[in-house]
C-alpha cells in the first residue's frame, strides 16, 4: 500500500486527477471505476481542467460508478446520475455509451446487479478504481458487516450513513435507505485502486482501515490485501495515522 500525503485538499485533488490522467494517457481505453461524495469533487474539477487545457481526451475511456440510490430518479439532484452528469460528464467527452451507473430505478434490482457485474466483465474488468471512505469505514455502500465476497448487490444503508448523507437532502426521511453498490469482491478485482481521504473526521477510521484488523467491521480494511492501492490523504485526515507502525 502506497500512502501519499497531500498538503491540503487542493493537492489531494490534483494528485488524484494526475493519476487518472496518466492512466488514460497510457491506455486511452481504460476502464475506470468512479466514486461520488464530496471528496472526489476536486478531482473531477482538475480532470476537467486537464481535459480543456492539456487537451486530454476521454473519448475511449469506459466508466463504472460504484453505486446509486435505489428508487431515486436519474434527474433527481441527489442521485449519483445527476452528480456525475453535472460534476464531470457534461464537461468532458466520455461517450454516453461508455458511462455506466447502476440503475436504481430498475424493476428487478437483483437482475440489474447481475447485469452490472456482467458489463464490468465484458469491458475487461476495472483498470483503476477511485474510492472515497465513509466515516464508518464503508467503501461504495459496503457498510460495516458486509460480506467480503459480495459482488454488486442491493445494500442497506447504515443509520450513520443516512445521517452523514442527509446534508444533501431536505430532511432525514428523504434519504433513501437502500442503494445498488459494487461489492467488495468487485472492488478488489480492480487492477489498481486509489482511495481519497479528506478531513479530520476521517482520521480515526483511516487509521483503523490501514493498520487495524482486516474485518468486515471496517470494510475499507480489506484494501490491505490488495496489491496495488494508493491512499491519498490530506493533512487533516492524516493527523492520527500511526506512522511508526509501518515504514513510510
Ligand atoms: N457512497 C458514497 C461513498 O462512495 C463515499 O465515499 C462516501 C463518503 O463521502 P464523502 O466524500 O462526502 O465524505 O459517501 C457515500 O456514502
Image (cartoon, rainbow, N blue to C red):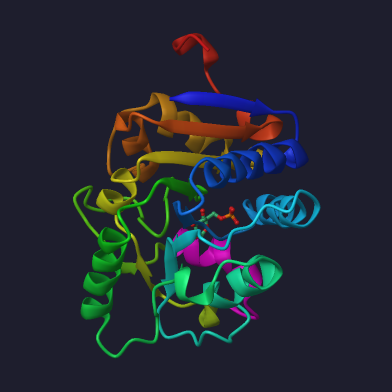
Q: Is residue 148 above or below residue 142?
A: above
Query: Which quadrant of the view contains residue 94?
Result: bottom right
Q: Residue furthest bottom?
A: 107
Q: Inspect the magenta stretch and tell me whether residue 164 lies in it.
A: yes
The residue located at (39%, 87%) in the rendering is 105
Query: Which quadrant of the view contains residue 143?
Result: bottom left
* Quarter the N terminus occupies: top left
Q: Residue 226 in the image: x percent, y percent?
A: 32, 33
Q: Which residues are magenta?
A: 159-171
Horizontal side of residue 243 vs 12, given as left or right: left
Q: Inspect the magenta stretch and tell me whether residue 96 lies in it.
A: no
The residue located at (58%, 34%) in the rendering is 232
Horizontal side of residue 16 vs 96, given as left or right: right
Q: Residue 175 in the image: x percent, y percent?
A: 51, 77
Q: Residue 131 in the image: x percent, y percent?
A: 49, 48
Q: Which residue is more in the foreground, 49 or 201?
A: 49
Res 158 visible: yes
Q: Which residue is more in the foreground, 212 or 87?
A: 87
Magenta span: predominant SS is: helix
Count the labels in the image.
0
Res 240 visible: no
The residue located at (27%, 63%) in the rendering is 122
Q: Residue 15 in the image: x percent, y percent?
A: 66, 36
Q: Residue furthest right?
A: 53
Query: Which quadrant of the view contains residue 82?
Result: bottom right
Horizontal side of residue 234 vs 153, given as left or right: right
Horizontal side of residue 110 vs 167, given as left or right: left
The residue located at (40%, 62%) in the rendering is 158
Amino acid at each position: 500500500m502506497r500512502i501519499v500525503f497531500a498538503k491540503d485538499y487542493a493537492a489531494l485533488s490534483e494528485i488524484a486527477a494526475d493519476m487518472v490522467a496518466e492512466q488514460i494517457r497510457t491506455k486511452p481505453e481504460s476502464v475506470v471505476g468512479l466514486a461520488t461524495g464530496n471528496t472526489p469533487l476536486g478531482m473531477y474539477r482538475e480532470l476537467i481542467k486537464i481535459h480543456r487545457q492539456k487537451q486530454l481526451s476521454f473519448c475511449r475511456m469506459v466508466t463504472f460508478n460504484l453505486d446509486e440510490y435505489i428508487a431515486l430518479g436519474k434527474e433527481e439532484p441527489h442521485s449519483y446520475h445527476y452528480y456525475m452528469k453535472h460534476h464531470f460528464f457534461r464537461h468532458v467527452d466520455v461517450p454516453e455509451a461508455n458511462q455506466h451507473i447502476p440503475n436504481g430505478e430498475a424493476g428487478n434490482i437483483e437482475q440489474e446487479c447481475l447485469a452490472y457485474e456482467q458489463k464490468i466483465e465484458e469491458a475487461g474488468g476495472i483498470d483503476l478504481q477511485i474510492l472515497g471512505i465513509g466515516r464508518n469505514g464503508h467503501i461504495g455502500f459496503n457498510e460495516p458487516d458486509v460480506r467480503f465476497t459480495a459482488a454488486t448487490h442491493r445494500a442497506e444503508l447504515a443509520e450513520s450513513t443516512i445521517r452523514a448523507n442527509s446534508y444533501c437532502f431536505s430532511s432525514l426521511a428523504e434519504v433513501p435507505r437502500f442503494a445498488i453498490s459494487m461489492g467488495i469482491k468487485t472492488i478488489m478485482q480492480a487492477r489498481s485502486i486509489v482511495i481519497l481521504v479528506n478531513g479530520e473526521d476521517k482520521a480515526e477510521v483511516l487509521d483503523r482501515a490501514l493498520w487495524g484488523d482486516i474485518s468486515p467491521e471496517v470494510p475499507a480494511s480489506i484494501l490491505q490485501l490488495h496489491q496495488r492501492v494508493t491512499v491519498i490523504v490530506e493533512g487533516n485526515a492524516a493527523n492520527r495515522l500511526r506512522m511508526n507502525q509501518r515504514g513510510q
